[in-house]
Amino acid sequence: MSEQLYPISIEVNGTLREALVPARLSLVDFLRDTLRLTGTHAGCEHGICGACSVLLDGEPVRSCLMYAVQADGRKLTTIEGLAQPDGTPGALQDAFCEAHATQCGFCTPGMVISAHALLETNPAPSEHEIREAIGGNLCRCTGYQQIVDAIKLAAAKREAPTP
Amino acid sequence: MSAAAQKGFRYIGKKRRTKEDPRFVTGRGRFVADIALAGMKHVALVTSPHAAARIKAIRADRALALAGVHCVLTGAELCAAVEPLLPGVDAPKVTRYPLAHGVVRYAGEWVAAVVADTRALAEDAAERIEVDYEPAEYVLDPEKAVLPGSVLVHPLHGSNVLYRRKFVWGPVEADFARAEHKLALRVRWGRSATVPIETFGVAAQWDPGRQLLDVWASIQMPKYPDQTARALRLPGNAVRVHFDVDVGGSFGVKRGLKHTVLVGYLARKLGYPVRLIEDRLENMRGGDMHGPDRIFDVQVAFDGDGTIRSLKIRALDDVGAYAGRSPLQLGKPVGAIVGPYQIHSVEYEPISVMTNKTAQEAVRGFGQSPTNYALETAIDRVARHLGMDRIALRQKNFIRKDQFPYLIPSGTSYDSGDFHTVLDKALAAADYPALLAARDAARRAGRLAGIGISSCLEPSGGNSAFEPLFNPKNETTTWMDSCLVRVDLSGAITGVMNTSSAGQGHDTLVATVLGEVLERAPDTIRVVHADSLNALPSNSPVGSRMAIMLGGAAAGAARKIKAALFAIAAHKLNQDLADLEYHEGSVSVKGDAKRMLSWDQLVEIAHRKFHQMPSGLEPGLQAKFVWEVPTGGALPTADGRIQMYPCFSFEAHVVLVEIDPATGQPKLVRYACGHDCGVMISPDIVHGMTCGGIAHGIGAALYEKFAYSDNGQLESQSFMDYLIPSAMEVPAIAIVDHCSPSPHTSFGQKGSGEAGYLGAPAAIACAVNDALAPLGTSIDALPMTPLQIWTRMRDVRAGN
Ligand code: FES
Ligand code: FES
């Protein structure tokens, strides 16, 4: 069965990526299988768990609910794109380490993406705003408390950057 | 003692970053779905639409006609080629194969497997497979299934009962006769599970040149490599399981043996790597990972002053159509059957019954949390019956801290604890007087509000004593774990563990323990996971055991390394061992610090200078330590008494719930948990697991249920119908620590992997019922969903 392929070009973590993809290829499969960016996870593939969250032109979206062709011409940031250039944790990711906001690590990329989107628009969120912002990301390990702590910590560090 | 016991360590108990977090926060974990093998093909499944049926014909031509589809496998071929998977109890006719063999026994059971170039293509092909079924009678109600004359799930077994025994420990009838009061209650624990965010997955590759099956899996299962090999009729050393795969949560359920046997068979048959990643529907329906589904009938005998004398517990557990280790989940609670209370005698009748539903698998706590819910509900009922304060009743019956070790009627000795203090700490953390005031104010304002209290044990140290208890043919009396430590020529330390991890932070555990004993910075210590052919024996991270068992094994191996360093130094410095002291890796003569051998010098002697080694010491610097579960090693007595687990953590929960009168939605307004797991090796990890366990317990208490329709269809098949609590449903949780060290472990640690989950459902259920009490009603089944609460409120009001 030969499916028709469509050319797409997407800027992923600052690099232009071009590919020929079938129309039905989901964005999460494109990222994971085609680009081998496996930090974006698929937990439910029906839009509830949030593990597949990525930033599309800065907005958090669920990559399991989008087709790769829909991202043509757009800018994507995945969890890998929030790390420092040498691959070590970026500031928000570092706060997640400091607060031990991850256990199995499966929900973590989606959590970090949602937290990043929150802090970009609301640099000093309340606890309730934090919980709302990650309300669409399920975590089965942590009970969310250390995740909330991590986001508070990251917000505080943004307020007072170390000199 | 408590604060002191947690002090005096260099790394243990300190706030330190974990070793695992950096790779997870940057998306650099390595999960099974991340593993791409060259030429790998993908599996999709055809599943039964019927709760019970005979398979008349399977036609695969239309699937095989698709380009890129390589194979359609059915039970007829597979079942002849592999050994059946057997339940943990003695029921040889209750066989399970990865694919149905002639009949299907639940909706969702796998009937055929398709292998194709991509997962999407395999799923397309699966839809083109036609199966003719002849529907058959089925049974869904465990109370009907247990009766003689019921429709049989496995006719060859002769009944639906997989296991049943009535244990009597102590003078139960005499105690009941003597007691001033008795009451009986029935509660039901609903069918839920751990439902990790990562589904189960497995990839396998057969190497014909080496005659070796390589397996990568999202697994948390004791004896997994052995069982895979046995089922595939391969020698144990022809299966190599790679334990360096990150497991995206498990909490007990990731026992994908049937998946592995299927994929292993396909990989060998087809000659290329094959992978199966469950989608969420697959995971919930045919993934065989439902949890306990239990009806408890409890009778309590007690006196007017609140003294609880005796208990009778009948637990009817619906294990679904097949059983792995799930019948044994009725066995573990034997080791804490009286909870934290001094209860003189107990009768316990566990009954494991099969129905036409998805199979049950191990769930966090291995049956203990449902039992705790039944026990704590009974305690509340006694308090209400006597008009006694629930807290005072618990405090009256608690085992006192001067009574340890404390032998309970079922033969297990509790190691240590201070239940009174921990409950007091939880009440203080919750500000109990303020909580009461808030509840009463809410009630005066016409709202429903209630306070829940629970106190329970977390048996830890994961032994498997329920195996011989429930199956006399099984004489398993060891459940060891191991660690290998190597110090290389550069002086760097590597700890080798022998299973995969599912978020428990084992790398951090091993590094912290090795660092503690050897006084070397844990950050510099690497921890690796051996594959199963390189591994020392391990029974995997089950039963809250790794802090105790892996931690103990790592400590044992590190102490051997330290002993070798001492021996080398004594020889080289020509000193008695007693005259030497150790400091951060160097060994010196006491009182003469200048006569010293540094870590690097000692390592160099061990690795290069055999002529400087004392005789009898092997060259190199490495040590293994294999550890039997402390207090383990014995078979049960004839009347079923056994030391189940070695260590007993304790938790006390205090929760304030308010219920929205319009919707029935419960809101957890305040949550505090007092927790004593002995010495905490990594407090952040313990606190995280405890909060996660509470969140999971909130789900089991209020939201999560694998519901079935009357015709045996699973109605909760996605995260839209199976509701996992989000950050909006889980409140801020105040955890207060206490430390009663265990006398059985290397540093006084106990287990904490199931913490929170063991007491949260009981506390929340008690709170909801306290809220409903002014209406004169209660709910005796979990989950107490908002709809159920709302319906109950409506019915009461209509009755009024
Ligand atoms: S995988 Fe996309 S929301 Fe769950
Ligand atoms: S850390 Fe495991 S699901 Fe969130």
Image: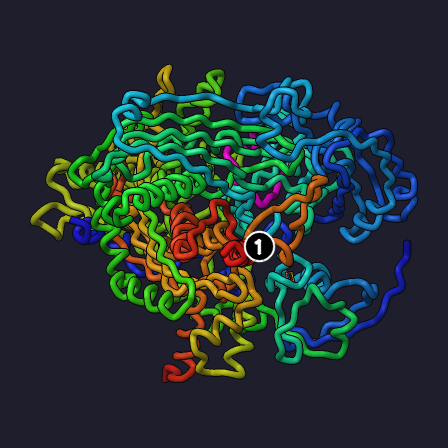
Residue indicated by mark 1: B197
| Amino acid type of the residue that numbered disc 1 sits on in the rendered structure | Ile
Residue B620 appears anywhere in the view: no
Q: Does B202 sit above or below residue A9?
A: above
Residue at the extreme front: B800
Q: Does B616 sit above or below residue B509?
A: above
Q: Nearer the viewer, residue B452 or B106?
A: B452
Residue B134 appears anywhere in the view: yes
Q: Nearer the viewer, residue B96 or B375?
A: B375
Left or right: where does residue B80 sit relative to residue B376? Answer: right
For image coordinates 52% across by 61% down, the residue present is B664
> Quarter of the image holding residue A5?
bottom right
- Which image quadrant shows ligand 1? bottom right
Q: Nearer the viewer, residue A144 or B730?
A: B730
Q: Position of residue B276 (x, y in %)?
A: 69, 45
Q: Does B136 sit above or below residue B595?
A: above
SS assignment at label 1: loop
Q: Chain of mark 1?
A: B
For image coordinates 53% across by 78% down, the residue present is A118
Disc 1 within 8 angstroms of ligand 2 (CB) = yes
> Quarter of the image holding residue B567?
top left
Left or right: where does residue B4 sit relative to residue B197? Answer: left
Q: Position of residue B461 (x, y in %)?
A: 36, 37
Q: Does A96 sit above or below residue B577?
A: below
For image coordinates 18% across by 53% down, the residue present is B3
> Quarter of the image holding residue A18?
bottom right
Left or right: where does residue B590 sit relative to residue B293? Answer: left
B317 magenta-colored? no
Crowd around label 1: few <14 · some 14–19 · many ≥20 (10 Å)? many
Left or right: where does residue A81 sit relative to residue B772? Answer: right
Q: Which residues are magenta?
A: B215-228
